[in-house]
């Protein structure tokens, strides 16, 4: 059992804590936040001790690992502090905001022999696992193109001066909150992204970064893709991949946090569409538990170091393209 502290108790930190109740692989036994007094209610609700600081967590011998769920620009500093303290580390996405920073973190984890967890839980959704299988098995044929959209209005209540709307912490509208999940899925299925062009717009929300982002990209293989993420519309989730033998599309009934069924539609050369429905799955829990088992040597973790770095490089290139208006190399 991996004894784990949750660092950061905003909306998503609390979701993560609740997702692993009664897990047989890890237990959240400590909490920490920048302003502890704001989270005494959650300490009382969960019965998990809330320590006064991140530093207190690192000194605690009852803590084997930390989950870093804080503003993105803090990840690298907190990662190295946890590494120095001998803790195992799971970091929320995006791992960092620059490729150089991600490389430092990934290399340090590798040098220390750590299995660094990463908060891209959408890889663990049933429909995404099945699409990944179709791609890997060759049933899709030659990869041609992918299209996806991950949109919701959860951030509509974010304060204008909050970190989630900051151009420094969350460049390119919904990319850090939503879009990086899609690029992670693309990289895991289609390989490295070579170049891209992106644009943002501000239509409804007053967030400095805007409420719409879309990106066109080309993979090193020659395949192409498109993504969109909107921060001011009811939940919409779609993920489609096209090959010369088959296309496959995942559709969600609700935000992954809310559960709900998901649907996979496939169509082969015979032109007949087949639909399969998957029951709700807690992908956040699945990711955290897979990481905990990997830390304990029970299985391999499904993220490669190259993928961890490449997705941050893609995010950095998107931020550059939004400013330049041009195609940018990754």
Image: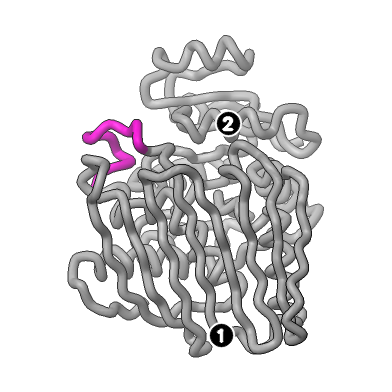
The residue closer to the viewer here, 208 or 54, is 208
Q: Residues within 10 Å of mark 1 (few under 14, many from 20)?
A: some
x, y percent for residue 172: 30, 57
Residue 100: image quadrant is bottom left
**Which label's residue is closer to the chain start, 2 or 1?**
2
- Number of on-image labels: 2
What's the colour scheme? one colour
Tell me the residue at 56%/53% (across/down): 120
Can you give x and y, in whole percent of width and height, for residue 302 in the image? 68, 62
The one nearer the camera, 124 or 207, is: 207
Q: In this rendering, would 174 be left or right of 219?
A: left
Above or below, comparing residue 164 to residue 189 in the picture: above
| Residue for point 47% across, 28% down | 9
- Badge 1 marks a residue whose secondary structure is strand
Quarter holding the N terminus is: top right
The residue lying toward the viewer, choosing from 77 and 212, is: 212
Q: Is residue 295 visible?
A: no
What label does residue 5 carry, if any? 2
Q: Looking at the rendered structure, which numbered label has been put on residue 173?
A: none
Other residues around mark 2 within 10 Å, as few (<14) / some (14–19) / many (≥20): many
Q: Is residue 324 above or below residue 205?
A: below
Whole-percent x, y for residue 143 in the image: 60, 84
Residue interval drawn in magenta = 156-167
Tag shown at residue 144 = 1
Quadrant where the C terminus is found in the figure:
bottom left
Closer to the camera, 297 or 229?
229
Circle 2: element type: strand
User: Looking at the image, is 259 positioned above or below residue 325?
Assistant: above
Check residue 18 for magenta coloring: no
| 40, above or below 168, in the image | above
- Looking at the rendering, which quadrant does residue 237 occupy? bottom right
């Amino acid at each position: 059992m991996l004894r784990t502290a949750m660092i950061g108790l905003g909306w998503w930190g609390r979701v993560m804590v609740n997702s692993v109740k009664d897990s047989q692989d890890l237990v959240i036994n400590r909490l920490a936040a920048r302003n502890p007094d704001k989270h005494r209610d959650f300490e009382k609700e969960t019965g998990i001790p809330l320590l006064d600081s991140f530093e207190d967590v690192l000194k605690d011998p009852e803590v084997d690992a930390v989950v870093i769920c804080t503003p993105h620009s803090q990840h690298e500093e907190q990662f190295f502090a946890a590494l120095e303290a001998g803790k195992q580390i799971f970091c929320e996405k995006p791992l960092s905001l620059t490729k150089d920073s991600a490389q430092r973190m990934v290399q340090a984890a590798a040098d220390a022999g750590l299995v660094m967890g990463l908060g891209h839980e959408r890889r663990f959704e049933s429909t995404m696992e099945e699409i990944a299988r179709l791609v890997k098995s060759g049933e899709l044929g030659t990869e041609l193109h992918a299209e996806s959209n991950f949109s919701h209005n959860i951030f509509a209540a974010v304060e204008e001066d909050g970190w989630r709307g900051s151009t420094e912490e969350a460049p390119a509208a919904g990319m850090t909150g939503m879009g990086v999940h899609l690029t992670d899925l693309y990289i895991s299925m289609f390989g490295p992204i070579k170049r891209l062009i992106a644009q943002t717009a501000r239509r409804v929300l007053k967030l400095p970064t805007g409420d719409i982002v879309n990106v066109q990209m080309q993979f090193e293989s020659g395949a192409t893709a498109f993504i969109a993420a909107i921060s001011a519309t009811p939940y919409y989730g779609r993920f489609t991949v096209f090959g010369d033998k088959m296309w496959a599309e995942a559709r969600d009934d609700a935000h992954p946090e809310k559960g709900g069924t998901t649907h996979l539609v496939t169509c082969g050369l015979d032109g007949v569409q087949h639909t399969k429905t998957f029951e709700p799955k807690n992908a956040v829990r699945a990711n955290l538990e897979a990481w905990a088992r990997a830390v304990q040597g029970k299985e391999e973790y499904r993220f490669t170091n190259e993928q961890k770095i490449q997705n941050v490089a893609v995010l950095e290139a998107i931020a550059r393209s939004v400013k330049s208006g041009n195609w940018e190399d990754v």
